[in-house]
Amino acid sequence: MLGGAEEIGANCCYLNLDGTGIFIDAGLHPRDRTEKAFPAVDLIGNRETDVLLTTHAHTDHIGGLPYVMRRFPHLRPIMTHATRDLSHVMLPNGARLLKTEISDHVPKEWLEFYHRDVIEQLRYAFEAIPYGEPLTLRGYNGRSDVKATFHWAGHILGSAGISLANKGFSILHTGDVQFDHQTVIPKATLPRHHVDVLITEATNGALEEMSTIAAETKRLAVFINSISERNGSVLIPCFALGKMQEMLALLYSMMRKGSIPYLPIHTGGMGTRISKIYDQYCYSDPMRRPGFEISDVPQEPIHRFDLDTGSYMKTPSIVLASSGMVNPGTISFNLAQRWMSKPRFGIAFIGFQHPSSPGYQLMNSKPKTPFDLAGTRVSRTCEIERFRFSAHASREGLVSLAMDVRPSTVVVMHGEPDACDGLALEIRERLPGTRIIIPRLGVPYVLDSTQEYLSV
Ligand SMILES: [Zn+2]
Ligand SMILES: [Zn+2]
């Protein structure tokens, strides 16, 4: 692992299969802005580097791609069609994040990899492939073919789990995966036959049980109703890619079923551009309701430079704004600051909050009790509630995948330490005798001990 070992970081996994060097994902760390923001590619030494397979377009999986591609310009970048289109919006955004937040520890020339023209050119190299069709890869020093297949992962538009096969040896990498239906996106259809190695994400591995989308929807309706009945507005900070589209579809269906009133919904910025890409794929990619377009949901724009006079300040409304973790300088951060002094207003947290993020500080604050928000001492009177609408599989879902594919080795990644431990322990109990690795950053592991070529 060159990132994403015992954390949700600059996710990047390196595999060497009979002389073909394969990177899976090249992410940007969600919070760290030192050199750890990028995948630690130097740790692979002079091993072969041939292809870069991208599982999906979230920044923690694709944001480090310009950096990795500049370090290894000969790499062949491969992804699904939708991920390629989403990268057009996500990569420039990653570049913006880096430029505004990067620390002095990072060599300035690294930022040149994120220059607009460089990213623009880079995208011409992206190779898009359909789901389910095996692709033959063989690196410059590769001694035999590797077959790579992308499978629907049920996480966001374009998301894929990737299977690799070489000389009878097989690996399944889940990427970020969800085995339950969301509102827009249907559940994953990863292969369930035997593989030798399962490399699995573990985001929710620490949670014994997860509440269902139906139960959380009910709670959300109660929250929105209580705020709107007293003439307040609800702010929902959410990731622009995935969460924003799921929330729009969910709120609209709640309104149509009558569980909440028809309130104006405000959205804006990058989320709107991403919704358009969702709509372009509403027939061709897996969708729960083929043909349903996010743009069918009535929405009013947020005016970034005029947040104080938005009609949501006077009329009960729902505001969906990124960033999901309420990072300083974003619309959700600026609106949250305005919400905090309004006892009639409410903030609903719906997704993952990194422990170092302002979203985490706000979500764990107590009313009328001073706390630190991005370095400033503040207190709040607005209401805050936390909901779980996960785009990631439950621990049980991941364990059941492991039970079906019966791997000899399981590699657990993409989770905080307690999540990795939680999933690893459960698999150990249910599949005794399975070798379980919680990999350390940069430490090489031999996955197929019968094959000499894999020794390190
Ligand atoms: Zn993701
Ligand atoms: Zn992720």
Image (cartoon, helix red, strand yellow):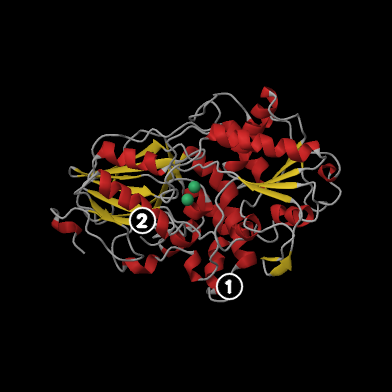
> Which of 92/364 is in front?
364
Q: Residue at x 52, y 42 (%)?
A: 390
Circle 2: residue type: Asp
Crowdedness near tag 2: few (<14), some (14–19) or many (≥20) residues, C-alpha within 10 Å: some
- In the rendering, which numbered label is found on residue 103? 1
Determine whether, in the image, residue 82 is placed left or right of residue 272.
Answer: left
Question: For the residue labelled by badge 1, is the local secondary structure a helix, a strand or a loop?
Answer: loop
Front position among marks 1 and 2: 2
Residue 169 sits above or below residue 263 on the image: below
Crowdedness near tag 1: few (<14), some (14–19) or many (≥20) residues, C-alpha within 10 Å: some
Q: Disc 1 and disc 2: Cα gap in Å?
A: 31 Å
Residue 261 sits above or below residue 50 on the image: above
Task: Using the rendered view, name the quadrant where residue 263 is placed.
Answer: top right
Residue matched to label 2: 421
Measuring from the top left, give residue 377's x and y in whole percent: 72, 68
> Which of 432/186 is in front?
432
> Which of 392/41 is in front?
392
Label 2 near ligand 2 (CB < 8 Å)? no
Question: For the residue labelled by badge 2, is the local secondary structure a helix, a strand or a loop?
Answer: helix
Quadrant in which the N terminus is drawn: bottom left
Circle 1: residue type: Ser
Q: Residue at x 75, y 60 (%)?
A: 368
Q: Is residue 413 visible?
A: no
Quadrant in which the C terminus is drawn: bottom left
Label 1 near ligand 2 (CB < 8 Å)? no
Measuring from the top left, give residue 262's x and y in whole percent: 76, 29
Q: Residue at x 28, y 53 (%)?
A: 139
Residue 239 sits above or below residue 66 on the image: above
